[in-house]
Amino acid sequence: MNRIKKFIEEAGWPRILIAVFLVILFIVAPFVGVPVDAAFSDTLVRFGMNGVLVLAMVPMVQSGCGLNFGLPLGIIAGLLGAVTSVELEAKGIPGVFTAMAIATPIAVVLGWGYGLLLNKVKGEEMMIATYVGFSSVAFMCIMWLVLPYSSSNMVWGYAGVGLRTTVSVEEFWQRAISDIAAFNIGDAFYFPTGMFLFFLLLCGLMWVFMRTRTGTAMTTVGSNPDYARASGVNINRMRTLSVILSTWLGALGIIVYEQSFGFIQLYMGPFMMAFPAVAALLIGGASVKKASIINVIVGTFLFQGILTMTPSVINSMLQTDMSEVIRIIVSNGMILYALTRVTKVRS
Amino acid sequence: MKRGPMGAEDPLLRVEGVGKAYFSNRVLKNVNFTLGRGRILGLVGENGAGKSTLMNILFGMRVIQETGGYEGKILIDGKEVHFRSPMDALNAGIGMVHQEFSLIPGFTVAENIVLNRETLVYNPLVEAFGDRLTTLDRASMTRRADEAISRLNIELDSSTPISELPVGYKQFTEIAREIDKKGTRLLVLDEPTAVLTESEADILLDSMRRLAAQGISIIFISHRLQEVMSVCDDIVILRDGEVVLQTTPAETSVRQIASAMVGRKIDRTEGPAEERRSSDKVAMQIEHLWVDMPGETVRNVNLTVFEGEILGIGGMAGQGKLGIANGIMGLHPAGGKVTFHGENVELNNPGSPLSLGISAVSEDRRGVGLLLEESIAWNIIFTSLQTQGRFLKSFGPLKIRDEEAIAECARKYIHDLEIKCTSEKQHVQELSGGNQQKVCLAKAFETRPRLLFVAEPTRGIDVGAKKVVLDTLKRYNREHGMTIVVISSELEELRSVCDRIAIIDKGSVAGILPASTPSEAFGYLLMGAGAAEAEKAANDNSNGTEAASA
């Protein structure tokens, strides 16, 4: 009894309730005609696709910059890397890594500027970050038309210039990472081993980084900036570094997402990408001041599980297609729920 | 000026056996005094002697009821009163001028004086929308303000906006506001001269005498003893929540007051027991230090800290003693020259003093001193980890935290300093004040400093923890030869641990005396009475003791 109590206390009621709800959805699924194996596979794929984007939240939360609502900025760096690698016709795993290699310096530069901006608006980071994300997406809407890409795989057919809203990577590096050591069970169950390994590798690196001297300082800056300063830590530098890290992980995250999804979504594609990542992290038990790797993994799984299962199960039950509506209600409802509970801090 | 002795009639204010404890912490004990009409009572005491609590009780402040009320009786005109809120006190004719101004900067002097009691004129809109739309009678408001100002006998244009006035005149505006209130019979002035220049203070004292002559009684809280002596009819001295002396200026001297104020809470023999030879080696040399710390401005401090000593820095709140450590540690903008063992300490850079081996325990425990939401272990090791790269182990090409070593170090301090906790993993916010302070000390000790600043080491902690903290400081000084600078408002505490004590007044050093010097000498320095007086008192007294022992 005590052990159960302790488990509940450590996991937190919200997570237990959501997990129970998810289990119920899986149990109900076969009775309303939703195939469980495909649904479970979908959940795992979505978990792998979104994991890195959620992980990108961690550095900024830890350094006290709040949730990275400016994630679209990192995503843009990733998109630039992705379209450039397609332009270069890089294929397979080298193609993905070309995309990442090109995205990295762009993410560092953008992240640095973004970090400088956030250092000027301490206490209001999340609000400013949201608008940094939005405005950078709007700016890139112009740039996607103007930038001199010419690959026939990407530009508008009728004009010969300007990138299309959706670019397929099927001929280049679709599932290049996912398919490493991937396997199928039956017809419908597919396990993207490579994508999982990549995600876990990044989680591991983050775990190690948070335990280095710099990572420790970053966490301390988030916990009490005055204490950190009195211990000789340069607060602004730590915050900027965390923003660069978050932006860079956002760039890697979107590339992982695209190689699994098979498409690069430009223009308004990144616009709302920050919100599901924020929701997943908060569902995982993080607060706006503290986030751990466990929060990322648990939260991404629960959130993507609910997001995959709820629409399909409820659609089948109601015999109508309102999956998108339900998705929006669930994901924004979760953000709302999580943000109202920000004061509750647990590490 | 007629200020006759108290007649047979009931005095305006009578305080009978008033006491107050905040939970288990007793701050006032059996306070008795009376205040007659038109008399000025000086209330004197060190920081924390209970003056503010007494005034809070008198003024019916919420905090008193919320913490269980008070003991004893307060009688006005011979009738017992129970003020439940400051409004009740105002209605009974008690006015208070606080240390922090409560004025609206954009309004004129007149508007501030009659604020919320403006003279109102009827207009037709009132019929439709109610009293809130009555018009202000500005001419009458100005007249009332001018009248109040003239009662103070000062030159002040009532149409000037508050934001353009010097501090002294803001103070006068506050007082004028209290006077304008009909029926103000008792005026409480809390440290009114602290922010005034000498000539402004003289004007204020003059105004006070005038008001008293008009029949208004005044409670004057001040630590400037000369002023108290010159203006008051009665003097009440508080120490540790008790009235230790009740006298009149004619019967006493500044020296007697000073000595009563600081008292002799600790026996002479319990002071620095061993005569310690002072080292001649200079550890830290501070020259012309200024620090812009809000509320604790340091103007020009010159101070030498010798190796291996415990130096005390004392002084009244707000005089700048806290600014010294914070300035040197780079936490507030500072200037001047500080050298440590011959090396220059770079100011405005917190990393510089730390790398030279200077550490500090902040007076702002919860704000600067601790990571409340982290474990005890992390709190203790963080500074050492950051500045000295300790508690790290290799992990491939990287170095990561050595959790084992960290836990072990934390357990060592938990045992050594008797930190009461469930384990080293417990979050610091769950600890009591005393144990939090021990964590702060452990953090500073772990950086193995050659010089340690400790600010307000015993503020807000219980007696048991106090002793552990002070003993620990002494032990580290004796066993590890750590040079320690203790900064505290509590003189007796300084006298019990320090070798020498510097008193800071108005942002610079008023004097430095050995800790064995009698309290009243320090009292002089605290009151800003000058170093010469203090020396004299010190010498007089030591002669006296010698004579007595002979």
Image (cartoon, helix red, strand yellow):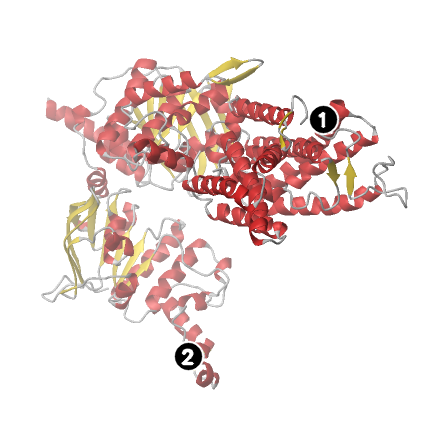
The residue lying toward the viewer, choosing from B130 and A306, is A306
Point 13% across, 62% down: residue: B6
- Left or right of A321: which side holds A344? left
The tag on residue B496 is none
**Nearer to me, A232 or A121:** A121
Image quadrant where residue A239 sits: top right
Q: Is residue A325 above or below residue B262?
A: below
Question: Does residue A275 appear to the left or right of A169 in the view shown?
Answer: left
Q: Is residue B457 visible?
A: no
Residue B202 appears left or right of B5 = right
The answer, for residue B139, to whether it is visible in the render is: yes
Image check: B456 left or right of A339? left
Screen quadrant of the C terminus of chain B: top left
Secondary structure beneath label 1: loop
Asked if badge 2 and badge 1 are on a common chain, one would say no
Q: Position of residue B71 (x, y in %)?
A: 15, 52
Quickly name the residue at label 1. Answer: A176
Residue B131 circle label: 2
The chain holding disc 1 is A
Type of amino acid at the residue the image marks with label 2:
Asp
**Chain letter, disc 2 residue:** B
The kind of residue on which mark 1 rests is Ala
Mark 2 lies on a secondary structure that is helix
Say which of marks 2 and 1 sits in front: 1
